[in-house]
Each structure stands twice: as structure tokens, then as C-alpha cells.
Image: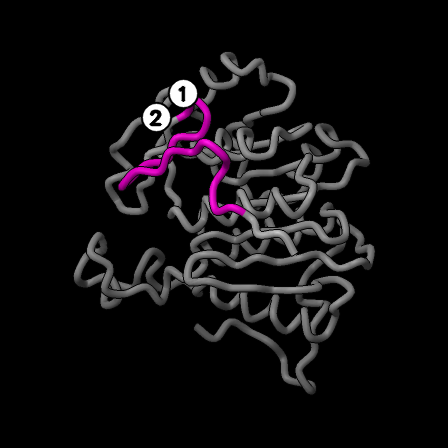
Amino acid sequence: MESVSEFPPGAVVGKDSIRINDIQFKINYSADMLTMESAAESFVLPKTFEMVSYYYRLGQTASIKNIVDLGIFKGGSAALFHLLYRPEKLVALDISDKREQALDGYIEKHFARDTLRPFYGYDQGNGPRLQELIRTEFGAVPLDLVVDDASHAYSLTRASFNTLFPYLRPGGTYVIEDWGWAHWDGWAHMPSDYQQSGGLFPGQPAMTNLIFELIMAAATSPGVIARVSVTFNMAVIEKGPDTVDPLTFDVGAYHVARGHQWQPIL
């Protein structure tokens, strides 16, 4: 088997940035990113170098042509995926109504109006509205990749998974970023009382509950969920060969546990 490079040919990797072609990505995985700004040639990218490497390697081993990216934020992920995959269509969504001017500038510079399509004011938990957008933008063409880097809240993340996962082709990839926030501890950029304060969503279920469900579904229904792989900040779910109905799909219907009823436990 041929080895796969960690980053695109010609990429320039610095201490806290990576340049791909003519675009600089400022790698920042801390609260500082909230006050940083993107530009059409320099994007804030709230990912680690390992995450960038994963997405590049994915494109070297699979055909990634039709993409949904949940969470526009500063525009970095949409620009990154457009550079890495040169997709036929990339639909990026955000709950905010405020357009990211840097991403608009990137789209104009790269003549990408038809291939990189940002939509604002979209709630990831609004299944019918997401389904309507998928049908309008992709028609009957299945998705190759869905990346959820949006709310990081359990209920909303589960809702958008149930909505979008059925539109993946067999072998397609669904990535849930930053699922492990309830368990993070001891990072230099995190408040010292992060765990004691309840993390990102005090009083709400951890996203870990969804990961548990997906793993159970992979055991019960491998034809639907073929594989789940996990790192501290990424859960990667591969779709199996079975067809599921996007209008009725719920991951909860695809796992059993000896008669025990599943409910969030963390």
C-alpha cells in the first residue's frame, strides 16, 4: 500500500499556521479564536494540525465531491475543504445571520460561486429546513462528506446527524468534531475550573452520549453504520451499504441492548 502524505504537496507548516497554495490558515484551538478575524487569504481555522492532516488524507483515499459543512464561523473550514477537495459542491451552513466577508472574498477570488455555497441563519436542529436545502442543492446526488463543527450541543448534534446521515453514499464519511468537550481537562488554554464549572454546556447531556449510541448502532446495524473511529476531538462515522429513509431515520432505531432502554447517562 502506498504511503499517504500528511499535508498537501507544497504546504508550508509553521508553528501555528499552515499555508496551502496561496491561503494561510491560522491554526487556533483556543478561546483566542473568538477575537481573531479572517481575511480572504488568511483564515482563522479552529482545528489542530492533526485534524487538517486527517482531512487531507481522507481526500487521498476517497472521492470527496459533495460536502456539507456545519458551522461557518470565520470561514476557515469551508475554504480548507474547497482547497483540499475541489468539490463539485460544498454547502456550508451557520446559525448566524452575519455573512463572513472573508469567505465571500475567497469565493470571488476563486470563482467558486457555484461550488462553494454558504447559507446563513440555518439552525442545525431544523430537520425539515435542512432536508429542503439538501434536495435543492444536491438533488438526488448523494453526499460524500458531512462535517459537524457547529453547536457541539448533544441534542442539536444528534438532530442534524439524523437529518444528514441518510444522504451519505455508502462508504461516505460523517465527522463530529469536538465531541469530547465534557471530558477535556488540563489544557493550557482552558480555564482552571473548566471541569468544575460544567464545561461548555453545564447541566446538558454530554455529546459522549451520541457517540455511545453510534457505537451501539455499529454493533447492531453494521449495514447502516459500518465503522466508528474516535480521537479526543473527532468522531468519524462511515456509512454502510444499507439504504435508510431520510424522512424517518433516527439512530435510536438501529441499536438494541438486551432489552435495556437507552437514555443519556452523562
Residues at marks 2 and 1 touching, judged by CB atoms closer than 8 Å: yes
Which quadrant does the C terminus fall into? bottom left
Dividing the picture into quadrants, the one containing residue 97 is top left
Q: Which amino acid type corresponds to the residue marked 1 in the rendered image?
A: Ala
Nearest the viewer among 196 and 75 is 75
Residue 220's spot in the image, x, y percent? 72, 74
- Residue at label 1? 102
Identify the mark nearer the N-term, 2 or 1. Answer: 2
How busy is the neighbourhood of tag 2: few (under 14 within 10 Å), some, or many (20 plus)?
many
Q: Which residues are magenta?
A: 5-23
Report helix, strand or loop for mark 2.
loop
Nearest the viewer among 112 and 202 is 112
Nearest the viewer among 7 and 113 is 7
Compared with residue 240, is residue 71 higher up or lower down, i.e. above or below?
above
Query: Is 194 placed left or right of 179 in the picture?
Result: left
Which quadrant does the N terminus fall into? bottom right
Report helix, strand or loop for mark 1.
helix
- What residue is at 62 percent from the left and 58 percent from the top? 237
- Residue at label 2? 38
Colour theme:
one colour
- Residue 116 can be seen, yes or no: yes
In terms of secondary structure, what is the magenta stretch mainly? loop
Magenta stretch holds residue 213: no
Query: Is 66 placed left or right of 156 in the picture?
Result: right
- What residue is at 25 percent from the left and 33 percent from the top? 35
